[in-house]
Amino acid sequence: MRTITHKWLILLFSLSLIVMLSGCQSKQSKSKNRTVTVVLDWTPNTNHTGMYVAKQKGYYKKYHLNVKFMQPPKDGAEQLVASGKAEFGVSAQDTFAGAIARKDPLPITTIAGIIQHNTSGIMSRKADGITSPKKMMGKRYSTWDLPIEQATIKQVVNDDHGNYKKLKLIPNNITDEVAALKSKQTDDIWVFYGWAGQNAKVKNFPINYFSFRSLNKVFDYYTPTLIGNNSFLKNNLQVAKDFMKATTKGYDYASNHPHQSADILMDQVPELKSNRKLVYASQTYLSKQYALGSKQWGKISATRWNGFYTWLNKNNLVSVKLKKDQGFTNKYLPK
């Protein structure tokens, strides 16, 4: 009887030990999960698909990351990331310049180019024949009244032997570029071809379009980009690298599976389903652009980065001169 009782005690002890160890492992596993926030630059769209793919397909989860997305405040993603209220954010090299070209630069760094080349340019009605910058003269251009934006337009118009002063600048409060052109609210407008250009195709609206990077290589800068909070990047090196491993995998998937990744984006952001045709068209276009001409998604060319910032310096578009290689790094990308 004593022998049986002794054996039962040993068995119970063993079971208790297993349960206890299991509980400890469970707590350790849970403690490894890290919540990080990504503040977007706009409402969710096909620029962001790779991150939504990484979330839904479990790429972030593999690295014990719980990634949350939020839309930006009025002052943009840069301020929120700099304040530490978000670990990562979506920015662009042109807007990012103002955040770091100051006496007290915001503590943020660009860690990846979401799209390898600048896909923006000028879109207009086909019938108006605005096929080059100089033909914008005498036409209404919708401006955001931003110094870098207007300097860019001035550069391309004057380089095309036109006169920037002959453009008719009107305020840009447009949310649907195709509708604005169709209703003759404006004559030409700065757009991102991956969305507005594809929208024109979906709606069968004839347009003319020319890209900035086709006119001057200095305008082949990075837009949009991923940025990170400097303190977070420094103190959480492995977390940052894991985030980028998963994000890279997400964009690689989106590059190779446009239709499926568009479905994932719409599943994660149901309000996009009302523009299903546009989402598919935009994703088909951008899937070829994410890593175009580069062996690795996200990698930033120092030559192109510095070329654009040198142009900003020369045109006095920043209050403090930007230094070579200032504001970006490729070290968080997977090797």
Image: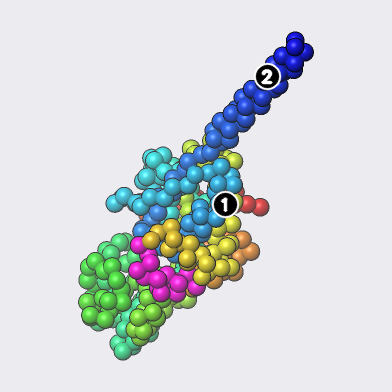
Q: Is residue 35 above or below residue 166?
A: above
Question: Residue 124 falls in which quadrant of the image?
Answer: bottom left
Q: Position of residue 230 (x, y in %)?
A: 48, 41
The overriding secondary structure of the stretch rendered in magenta is: helix
Q: Position of residue 114 (x, y in %)?
A: 50, 60
Extent of the magenta region = 271-284
Question: Which amino acid type is marked by label 1?
Answer: Tyr
The quarter of the rendered structure image containing the N terminus is top right
Q: Which residue is rendered at x = 27% and y = 71% of the image? A: 142
Residue that protrudes farthest toward the front in the picture = 1
- Residue 285 in sight: yes
Q: Which residue is rendered at x = 55% and y = 55% of the image? A: 57
Question: Residue 215 falls in which quadrant of the image?
Answer: bottom left
Question: Which amino acid type is marked by label 2?
Answer: Phe
Q: Which residue is rendered at x = 55% and y = 49% of the image? A: 60
Residue 272 belongs to magenta span: yes
- Residue 223 in sight: no
- Looking at the picture, the colour scheme in use is rainbow
Regarding mark 2 in the picture, which secondary structure is present there? helix
156 relative position to 234: left or right? left
Regarding mark 1 in the picture, which secondary structure is present there? helix
Q: Which mark is residue 59?
A: 1
Q: Position of residue 12 (x, y in %)?
A: 67, 20
Bin the neighbour count of mark 2 within 10 Å (Cα to Cα): few under 14, some 14-19, many 20 and up: few
244 relative position to 180: left or right? right
Residue closer to the observer: 163 or 214 = 214
The residue wearing badge 2 is 13
